[in-house]
Image (cartoon, rainbow, N blue to C red):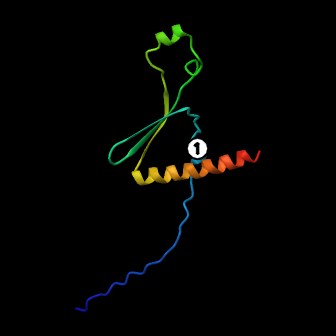
Amino acid sequence: MAEEQRREIEVERTIPIRIVGAEEIPISYVNYVFVSHTTDEFFMTFAQIHPPYLLAPTKEEVGQLTHIPAKVVARIALTPSKMKELIDALNENYKKFIQKEARK
């Protein structure tokens, strides 16, 4: 029997990613983000803290507080490489934002 020969052909091609369904997900405002990690993953918890906790409470009110409730609206887990990509993307977009705001 003749042995079949396989050829691997390397093709370089960029296939764009198209975001679908984003309009179906509600946008949530967050004013608190908690980040933690293990050796394999990063975890980001996005939450909302509502007044009166954001306002300057009186000394009596501060003395009565045992905790500040934060309503979690999303939790995300990322690999270290994806976390690096996220940090880079945030830095790049923030620099563009600052440059645009400076021109006003």
| Residue at the outermost front position | 102
Q: Is residue 2 left or right of residue 86?
A: left
Give the residue pinned by disc 1: 24
Q: Position of residue 65 (x, y in %)?
A: 47, 14
Residue pushed farthest top? 60
Q: Secondary structure at mark 1?
A: helix
Q: Which quarter of the image is occupied by the N terminus?
A: bottom left
Q: Position of residue 63 (x, y in %)?
A: 47, 10
Judge from the rendering whether residue 7 lies leftward or rightward of residue 22; answer left or right.
left
**Residue 39 place in picture, x, y as percent:** 32, 46
Seen at 43% across and 15% down, the residue is: 66
Name the image quarter holding the C terminus: top right
Residue positioned 40% across, 51% down in the render: 80
Q: Residue furthest bottom?
A: 2
Q: Quadrant of residue 26?
A: top right
Left or right: 101 in relation to 44 = right
Give above or below for 82 relative to 5. above
* Vertical side of 58 occupied by 31: above or below: below
Q: Residues within 10 Å of mark 1 (few under 14, many from 20)?
A: few
Q: Please, what is the three-letter code of the amino acid marked with disc 1?
A: Glu
Residue 90 percent location from the top left of the image: 55, 48
